[in-house]
Image: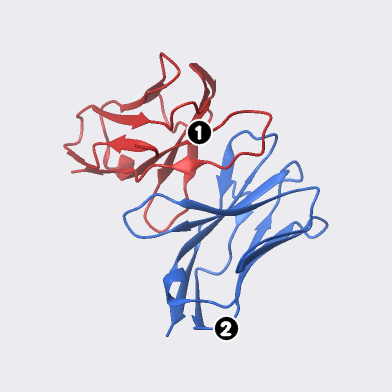
């Protein structure tokens, strides 16, 4: 039962342009959403989060948008940098209990 | 160290062997989670502790999997009679606790290969 879905396994973007990573979820009880970044041979690293009472959260080059009616969230990275190349996981939880992850999107930022 | 520490980093086991994977969470973190990550997939939830209490073990794939956190700090994930399908990266994560929107902080994982 895949409650969090990332339908794009990969994304390639030119340096300086915007990267948009998408995520859909099915469980309407989710109230906390996060994006994690993962480099090879390392654990996922927390990037940015948003609670269900908001529709946007911004941190530097990273912005997460939440559309509750569509059960959709997205991560915008602008401007994209080569160091942003990694696998990005979307995650969601309900009542701060177990967190469910998407399958990840591999972002490649080309110089 | 300041982060979540997992050991061993790599483990090769012959089919049928028992293995034990260790996790040292961030000091003071109440919640501890174990995840299993297969190649090309996202982390799949296994089990969750709040202090020493195992509040959810619904993700453990079989009764060969057992986790404990007896003193509310270090946790061990044990897999008995390992099978090839157990090969994966096992990730441990900790967070501050319940009642807060607190992100999980992950260790670097233990890569288990069952031959």
Q: Label 2 neighbourhood size at 10 Å, few (<14), some (14-19), many (20+)? A: some
Q: Give neighbour class at mark 1: few <14, some 14-19, many 20+ (Cα, 10 Å).
A: some
| Residue drawn at (58%, 66%) of the image | A7
Judged left or right of residue B31, residue A38 is: left
Task: Give residue B59's mark.
Answer: 1
The answer for which chain carries disc 2 is A
Q: Which mark is residue A17?
A: 2
Is residue B57 or residue A74 the one in the foreground?
A74
Query: What residue is at 83 percent from the left and 57 percent from the top?
Result: A69
- Image coordinates for residue A111, horizontal then vertical, percent: 42, 85
- Chain B's colour? red
Its colouring scheme is: by chain
Q: CA distance from mark 1 to mark 2?
A: 39 Å
B9 vs B81, nearest the viewer: B9
Q: Is residue A9 above or below residue A3?
A: below
| Residues under numbered marks 1 and 2 in contact, where contact means CB atoms less than 8 Å apart | no
Query: In this picture, is A103 found above or below A81?
Result: above
Outermost top residue: B71
Q: As drawn, is B81 to the left or to the right of A6?
A: left
> Residue A35: image x %, image y %?
58, 55
Query: Which mark identifies residue B16?
Result: none
Label 1, secondary structure: give it.
loop
Query: Quick one: SS at disc 2?
Result: loop
The disc numbered 1 marks a residue on which chain?
Answer: B
């Amino acid at each position: 039962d895949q409650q969090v879905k990332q339908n794009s396994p990969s994304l390639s973007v030119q340096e300086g342009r915007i990267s948009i990573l998408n995520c859909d979820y099915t469980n309407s009880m989710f109230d906390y959403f996060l994006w994690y970044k993962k480099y090879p041979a390392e654990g996922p690293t927390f990037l940015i989060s948003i609670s269900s009472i908001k529709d946007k959260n911004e941190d530097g080059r990273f912005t997460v948008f939440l559309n509750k009616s569509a059960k959709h969230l997205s991560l915008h990275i602008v401007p994209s940098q080569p160091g942003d190349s990694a696998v990005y996981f979307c995650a969601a939880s309900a009542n701060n209990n177990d967190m469910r992850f998407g399958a990840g999107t591999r972002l490649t930022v080309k110089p | 160290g300041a982060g979540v520490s997992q050991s061993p980093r790599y483990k090769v086991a012959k089919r049928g062997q028992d293995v034990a994977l260790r996790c040292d969470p961030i000091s003071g973190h109440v919640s501890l989670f174990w995840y299993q990550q297969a190649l090309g997939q996202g982390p799949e939830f296994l089990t969750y502790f709040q202090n020493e209490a195992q509040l959810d073990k619904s993700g453990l794939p079989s009764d060969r999997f057992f986790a404990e956190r007896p003193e509310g700090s270090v946790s061990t994930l044990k897999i008995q009679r390992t099978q090839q399908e157990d090969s994966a990266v096992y990730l441990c994560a900790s967070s501050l606790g319940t009642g807060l929107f607190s992100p999980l902080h992950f260790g670097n994982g233990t890569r288990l290969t069952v031959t």
